[in-house]
Image (cartoon, rainbow, N blue to C red):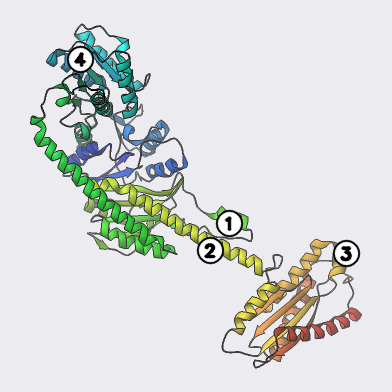
Amino acid sequence: MENKSGNHNIAFCIGDLQAGKMLLQGLCQQLEYNGINLHIFNGCTSFYENEPQNIGQTNIYNLPNYDLLEMLIVAPFYMSDSDAIVRHTIENALAKNVPVLTIGKQYDYENCYCIIPDYRAQIELLTSHLIEKHGMKKLNYMGGAKGNRVSEDRLLGYKDALEKHGIPFDESRVYYGEMWSEPAKRETERMMKEGKLDCDGIVCANDSMASAVITKLNELGFNMPGDIAITGMDGLEEAGGYITTAKILAEGAGRKAGEIAIDLLKNGKKPPLLSIIPPNIMYGISCGCKTADETNALSVIQRHEVFDELYHTRQFSTRTSMLVQELANCNTFEEASRNISKTLSKIWCDNSWICICKDFMTGTIENDSIDDMNASCPVHRNDYCDTMRCIARFYDKKPQEPTEFPTSQMLPDFYQVSDKSKIILYSPIHIRDNTLGYLAFNFYPWSNTNYLLNFVTMAISQLLEAVRRQNELYLYAQKIDMLYVTDPLTTLYNRRGFFRLYNDYMEEQEKKNCMVISIDLDSLKLINDNFGHNEGDNAITTISNALKEAAGKDDICARFGGDEFVVFGIGKSEYDMDKYIKSVSAYLDDYNKRSGKPYNVHASFGGCIMPKDTTLHIDHFINAADSKMYVDKESHKRTRTLCNNR
């Protein structure tokens, strides 16, 4: 697709939007006014263990088309804990000669660049701050998982600071909180039991553990931060102003990534393979550098932001519930599509799209075996189908007609909508490992609402799948019903099916003269005895085909028993009945001439007309037709022989 806009389009793959919020804000801020559109592919979570649910989420990383996108940026730590998924995503771009920029972790690929924080230097600065600024000599360390490369790298920074200031390293003062709150609290209790809370401060490898340590120390009766100083790392929002920390993979890293993208795409300037993000220390109350009075203004701002987010969360939850309620009673895909579009208009932003795989509802029964019903249902684990159906879309909050478009375009009118939206986020709509499609919308990095979108995509996923399953159950019920009223060998109606359709006719107000024909296959026992039951089945199938070929749209053809058939024709005369019998006989004669079988297929016929004003039951006319058929059969016994003497 020719890029007529002149603006550049790049992809950004991320799994944990909330964790990478500040990083994303810095990147978007840098790109916003530089003619570069950002397409964010959101995997919804960064923790994957190859479970079906996670396979369905990570399929979104296969959506980017690098014929349209000129660069890929990935943040591996916020994307996936599966290195294979990250590498596969990177390799997709490199295969199209599209440059890749990774944030936080370096990969050894050509045309793949990296910006990375110096974790070791940041921990060294934080530890040195406690020693130099606050004169502390006895320090504990709360690390991540023992042996983990990132965790050990941060531990080296702690050791560097001790060595730099001539303080011996004491292994017994190193604890491992696994980067999580609960393990950090347990390790703090262990410090207490082992008498190690005689320290001046505790250096924590991340902010989550620092916050947990402060909480546990307060529970244990320590006055924080007066008794023990605490530092963290990562610069999480919850740490701002309270925990002394180093802000990494945040706005600064995002802005640096934006600068590299601008230089590379607009100025043709290649960056170094590895760029180091300098430390950025933020001082807070936890080490005594700030007092509560100094952070009052920040506290007010944070309280406002927290309550604002709570308000948006409640509002979002209410609207998501509306979506669930409105979709819950949908019986068809079309009805669900209309309601999704209606609800989307109430809760979303200026431009949005819900794109569903065109083959989403093609899981139908296509053969005679109900065991194979699901065999035709499409499953998209590592790709999408070729065509998407955009079932709901809005431009400037105005609804647009549903449309279909090649999946390779990612969105209808890709360049036009990219320039209009500037930042577009794509989030998977999936059930377990089957990707049904994706939700896309123009993304506002500074709005809390955007980070709650997973609730909407989950609701859409579950309810669309419910509609499909309901449709499958309906088709399944139809199939079972057809098996109940049809003969499996011939696919003609059986006796139950015949009388169901006859009763439907009798419930109609307008009655017509009808023909009732009884047909019996001649010499079926002889065919079975001499040539086997397969040939007997062939003879039965042949006569059933003859009956169907001669029938009109209002004729009911049924197999009543082994070699017995009945045809009921609505609005037929004696002439029509004779014509039908002759047509069936002609079909059989033609078959016998070309079949090459050592036997002929013949039938005996008897028929009568059931007047439209009769009060007699259909059984009376079937018996009358049977009587005439038996007369015809007796005459055939005298004139026909088993073999055709060919």
Point out the tag, 1 or 3, that comes first from the N-terminus.
1
The answer to whether residue 222 is left or right of residue 77 is: left
Mark 1 in CB contact with mark 4 (< 8 angstroms): no
What is the C-alpha distance between the residues marked 1 and 3? 37 Å
At mark 1, the secondary structure is helix
The answer to whether residue 326 is left or right of residue 646 is: left
Q: Nearer the viewer, mark 4 or mark 3?
A: 4
**Residue where numbered disc 4 is placed:** 200
**Residue where numbered disc 1 is placed:** 373
Task: Name which residue type carries label 1.
Answer: Met
The answer to whether residue 94 is left or right of residue 24 is: right
Q: Nearer the viewer, mark 2 or mark 1?
A: 2
At mark 2, the secondary structure is helix
**Residue where numbered disc 3 is placed:** 529
What is the C-alpha distance between the residues marked 2 and 1? 12 Å
- At 19% across and 45% down in the image, what residue appears? 307
Residue 79 picture location, percent across and down = 34, 36
Mark 3 in CB contact with mark 2 (< 8 angstroms): no
Looking at the image, is 468 positioned above or below residue 103?
A: below
Point out the tag, 3 or 2, that comes first from the N-terminus.
2
Point out the tag, 1 or 4, that comes first from the N-terminus.
4
- Which label is found at residue 600? none
What is the C-alpha distance between the residues marked 1 and 4? 69 Å
Quadrant occupied by the C terminus: bottom right
**Residue where numbered disc 2 is placed:** 474
Point out the tag, 2 or 1, that comes first from the N-terminus.
1
